[in-house]
């Protein structure tokens, strides 16, 4: 066992193989009662020594029942009610008694609807073993995190993340970390969150660097569109679209209404002025632009010119949007599917082989989603960022899912052994070492080891034999 003292009270963690771990630490008050649908409030002090040897509660979220994949290593245990105080975080450190260590703060993915910092793939032992303080964060999800209610606050999930970064600034020195050398990073919804924190005036000064994996700064809705989603959900609940009314609903009731809204046909029209739904019907809840958290419209350059490492996998849509989901589609079905969230769908699909006898409509659609939802907007985010920017692509193909969405995460954490159901038993150890060391290098001094992303469009291609090469992602604005 090992203990640390914080401004909120004393913590008792565990110590294994030279790594100290402190779990389930509240960084904000439980978001219930009057604090529901309100900005995060400070966590209360506790008396005596708090046991921090087990993960805490997690945000309310629907149960995940994937058809063909065990995603638990990447999504965590699901909804764990616990004491209800799920605005908590977890810390791994090599030595609470030291000082000046670089800090990595991880924001989990899950489409802004599921996930937690307790997922096995996010275990921070390897980072701590190698001299970094690693923090994982829970934040509000779904309706509780991303609505626009009258009398409530918008972007509550992002506000929670900002509050967690504030906690890190104020407390991480007690765990051996340097509050002036913090890197925020995340994947999927967590990567998109990190990308949007680059735009938020409320996050100014809270981090020095950012790593955005399979995310970007375009997956957001204008305030008016989020308000329409809010009204639709209120209709499902049979209540008014106000914070007071929603505080009268239980978390279970909110989840049932979310599920009904997600299944409903037709769904609310969440397309923007260009006819594009930035969530492409896969992400119902997204960050909102036009408030104090994200005052700038999509497409604006980042406000914070910090160092940025950003990248995607080569075949993002193989997981979750894999070709098997569309296996029975003919060309008409593929066009209809894409047209629901993107104009000129057939023209775009033709660029990816639709009507080519050698390409199935399912594979054309999957390839389009990979570029439309991830690779193209990720590269635009890179080009707009005013600070030093580095781009990578994860190209190693697992025997089960290829170079799919999220499969780069266990390589960066050096936790591939937790994800054998997803990546098989053939994960190259050299690749895990290379990616893990890159994340360590970037968090320590901001240099991942290859040239910045400029007109030459050089990217690090992580594979069994990693190398710097020319980017193959779309280099135009057609995918917006």
Image (tube, rainbow, N blue to C red):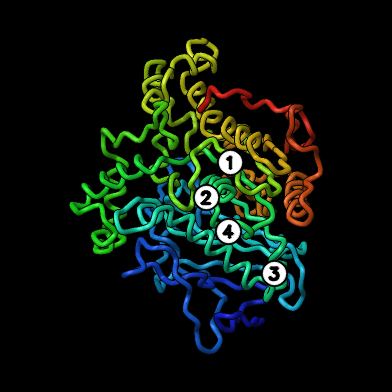
Read off the residue under disc 2. 109
Question: Are the residues tagged 2 and 1 within 8 Å (C-beta)?
Answer: yes
Task: Tell me the CA gap for discs 1 and 3.
Answer: 26 Å
Identify which residue, 386 or 110, lies in the foreground. 386
Task: Tell me the CA gap for discs 4 and 3.
Answer: 17 Å
The answer to which quarter of the image holds residue 413 is: bottom right
Relative height, residue 229 to residue 383 (above, below)? below
In this picture, residue 193 sits left or right of residue 35: right
Identify the secondary structure beneath mark 2.
Answer: loop
> Which numbered disc flags the more N-terminal residue, 2 or 1?
2
Q: Position of residue 405 (x, y in %)?
A: 56, 40
Identify the secondary structure beneath mark 4.
Answer: helix
Residue located farthest toward the left when viewing the structure as drawn: 238
Read off the residue under disc 3. 93
Identify the secondary structure beneath mark 1.
Answer: loop
Identify which residue, 454 or 351, lies in the foreground. 454
Read off the residue under disc 1. 214
Q: What is the number of the mark on residue 120?
A: 4
> Which numbered disc flags the more N-terminal residue, 1 or 4?
4
Q: For the residue carrying disc 3, how many other residues have a C-alpha within 10 Å: few (<14), some (14-19), or many (20+)?
A: many
Question: Are the residues tagged 1 and 4 within 8 Å (C-beta)?
Answer: no
> Which numbered disc flags the more N-terminal residue, 1 or 3?
3
């Amino acid at each position: 066992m090992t203990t640390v003292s914080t401004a909120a009270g004393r913590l008792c963690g565990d110590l294994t193989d030279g790594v100290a771990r402190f779990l389930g630490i509240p960084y904000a008050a439980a978001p219930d009662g009057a604090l529901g649908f309100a900005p995060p409030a400070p966590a209360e002090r506790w008396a005596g020594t708090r046991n921090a040897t087990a993960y805490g509660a997690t945000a309310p979220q629907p149960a995940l029942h994937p058809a063909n994949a065990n995603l638990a290593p990447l999504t965590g245990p699901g909804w764990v009610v616990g004491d209800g105080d799920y605005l908590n975080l977890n810390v791994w450190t090599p030595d609470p008694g030291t000082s000046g260590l670089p800090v990595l703060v991880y924001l989990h993915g899950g489409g802004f609807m599921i996930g937690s910092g307790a997922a096995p793939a996010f275990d921070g032992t390897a980072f701590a073993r190698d001299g970094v303080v690693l923090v994982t964060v829970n934040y509000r999800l779904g309706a509780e995190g991303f609505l626009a209610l009258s009398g409530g606050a918008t972007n509550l999930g992002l506000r929670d993340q900002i509050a967690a970064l504030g906690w890190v600034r104020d407390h991480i020195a007690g765990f051996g970390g340097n509050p002036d050398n913090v890197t925020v990073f995340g994947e999927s919804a967590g990567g998109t969150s990190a990308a949007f924190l680059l735009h938020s005036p409320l996050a100014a000064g809270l981090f020095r660097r950012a790593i955005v994996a399979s995310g970007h700064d375009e997956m957001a809705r204008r305030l008016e569109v989020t308000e329409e989603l809010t009204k639709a959900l209120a209709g499902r609940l049979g209540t008014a679209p106000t914070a007071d009314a929603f505080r009268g609903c239980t978390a279970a009731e909110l989840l049932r209404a979310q599920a009904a809204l997600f299944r409903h046909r037709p769904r609310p029209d969440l397309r923007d002025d260009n006819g594009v739904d930035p969530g492409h019907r896969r992400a119902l809840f997204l960050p909102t632009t036009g408030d104090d958290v994200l005052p700038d419209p999509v497409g604006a350059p980042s406000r914070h010119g910090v160092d940025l490492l950003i990248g995607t996998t080569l075949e993002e849509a193989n997981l979750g949007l894999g070709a098997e989901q569309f296996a029975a589609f003919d060309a008409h079905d593929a066009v209809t599917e894409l047209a629901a969230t993107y104009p000129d769908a057939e023209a775009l699909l033709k660029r990816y082989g639709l009507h080519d006898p050698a390409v199935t409509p399912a594979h054309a659609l999957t390839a389009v989603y990979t570029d439309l939802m991830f690779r193209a907007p990720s590269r635009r985010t890179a080009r707009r960022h005013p600070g030093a920017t580095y781009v990578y692509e994860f190209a190693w193909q697992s025997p089960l899912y290829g170079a799919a969405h999220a499969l780069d995460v266990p390589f960066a954490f050096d936790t591939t052994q937790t994800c054998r159901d997803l990546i098989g038993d053939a994960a190259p150890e050299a690749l895990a070492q290379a990616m893990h060391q890159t994340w360590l290098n970037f968090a320590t001094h901001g240099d991942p080891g290859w040239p910045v992303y400029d007109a030459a469009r050089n990217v690090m291609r992580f594979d069994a034999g990693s190398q710097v090469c020319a980017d193959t992602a779309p280099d135009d604005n057609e995918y917006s």
